[in-house]
Amino acid sequence: MAEAKLAEKPAAAASAEVLAVKDLQAWYGESHILHGINFNVKAGEVVTLLGRNGAGKTTTLKSVMGIIGKRSGSVRFDNREIIRATSDRIARLGIALCPEERGIFASLDVRENLMLPPVVRSGGLSLDQIFTLFPNLKERLSSQGTKLSGGEQQMLAIARILRTGARFLMLDEPTEGLAPVIIQQIGHTIARLKSEGFTILLVEQNFRFASTVADRYYIVEHGKVIDGFANSELSANMDKLHTYLGV
Amino acid sequence: MQALYAQLLVGLINGSFYALLSLGLAVIFGMLNIINFAHGAVYMMGAFVAYFLLNLGGINYWWALIIAPIVVGIFGMILERTMLQWLAGLDHLYGLLLTFGIALIIQGVFQNYFGSSGLPYSIPDQLKGGMNLGFMFLPIYRGWVVIFSLVVCLATWFLIEKTQLGAYLRAATENPTLVRAFGINVPRMITLTYGLGVGLAALAGVLSAPINQVRPLMGADLIIVVFAVVVIGGMGSIMGSIITGFALGVIEGLTKYFYPEASNTVVFVLMVVVLLVKPTGLTGRAA
């Protein structure tokens, strides 16, 4: 039963634009990191931001989440302007972030880590559904959060935002530093979430992984989006991609 | 033997105040990263609020136990909103200097109106008298202070270590940015935490009023020892500050019995030893 249906699909048409980012600029103190980022994400899509280290992918996610103090331009989520909103308000609108460093809390056990993000709206996964996706977590509930393996910590970091009812997930390099078998499991999870109607914005260095889950790609370079294409146009763009990513 | 037990009791009572105050300091330091030098002043304010309630409003001790921490807690939250919040992200030193200045101003104002001598605050009728325990005579009020402080300390520990609210608090101590990005209003939580820490100090002030009288400098005298207690226990741990508070009170009491000359310095000698051997304190985590 829990297998059959993780959460209800949104009623809206699949083509509705959930996130629209226009001319997004951001600064860390005095250094200007994002110089005008433009992209959008439609309901039910998995969109991947690709680019080299330091291109501004993580900063883009953080700016959407409202974590970067100084930012300008426009970020519209569900037709609401959120460029000036604080991150707690943005979270309550239904955006959830799984940060690159995972952000598992050492002073909390696994259960507390899992239960930490408050439910922002109905329709989140129940604990049973989460344990179906990530059976390992169930056995480690009373361990200290940071005693888990890297893969388990990544699963915990994803699991805890599925509880909240947020339908728009931002995953920052979820495969970084993990073993192939775990990367595969995370790939399955993302595909599963997509089939359940979640909308996902992914940041990845691992292009091979991204190509197994993404609908569309944007290339970020020097704080700008310089190109974008759909997964169906992938083979036609391979040469360009190699140049962009230097792989 | 009688004298030993009596000193042990005095030690436990002092330990109760150390524990309540160092607990609040630890909670505030964890969340705000501020060493709250105004802690002695708000302890004193708690005692004065109880005094005013009784003498101006005829409101008794039991109500003061509830009202004084709330009143002083609100005062603390106003301080946090208007001043302390602007120091977020700066070096510890700024918070220390600001709260030290605030403490001097508060104490100065109270000294201006009430001088330096103590104002009497009598023990509530229900807690007057004493009990003969066989091996010693126990004044009921003193026993009450020890037990009530212990209960409040353990309740605070439970709140922080075992509840969802406490999980927010611990998580926000580690990574406030991420906790806020989960949808929790961290700035409001910081304000409430400062209110809680200050409220605990005010509660200690009310408890102390019938024992030590109500004096503008009562907090200034105590807070120096409490900071030594915090250094010995380490800032990181809630249970650590409770246990260290009570333990050092008892050690002081024992010293008064066995070697009275050292009773005022024993805590500081221990502090020096701990700083040399384990600079993060006995239960503290490395910064």
Image (cartoon, coloured by chain):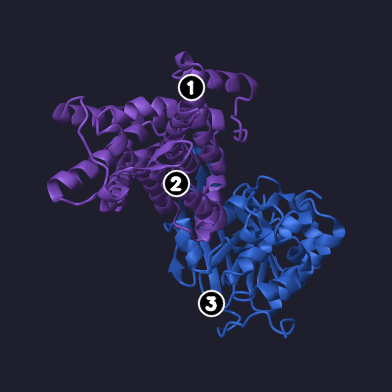
Query: Do the residues under discs 2 and 3 have CB atoms within 8 angstroms?
Result: no
Q: Is residue A233 visible?
A: no
Q: Chain of mark 2?
A: B
Residue flagged by tag 2: what amino acid is it?
A: Ile
Q: Say which of A144 and B200 sits in front.
A: B200
Nearer the observer, disc 2 or disc 1? 1
| SS class, disc 1 | helix
Residue drawn at x 64%, y 56% is: A226
Nearer the observer, disc 3 or disc 1? 1
Per the image, the residue denoted by label 1 is B257
Q: Chain of mark 3?
A: A
Per the image, the residue denoted by label 2 is B147
Which quadrant holds residue B203? top left
| SS class, disc 3 | loop
Residue flagged by tag 1: what amino acid is it?
A: Tyr
Indicate which disc residue A122 carries.
3
The location of residue A39, given as percent across then percent down, is 58, 63
Q: Is residue A215 visible?
A: yes
Is A170 on the left-hand or right-hand side of B86? right
The location of residue A182, given as percent across then percent down, is 82, 61
The location of residue A124, given as percent across then percent down, is 59, 74
Q: Crowdedness of circle 3 by 10 Å Cα count: few (<14), some, many (20+)?
A: few
Q: CA distance from mark 3 to mark 1?
A: 64 Å
Q: Which chain is blue?
A: A
Residue drawn at x 74%, y 66% is: A138
Q: Are marks 3 and 1 on the same chain?
A: no
Query: Do the residues under discs 3 and 1 have CB atoms within 8 angstroms?
Result: no
Which quadrant holds residue B86? top left
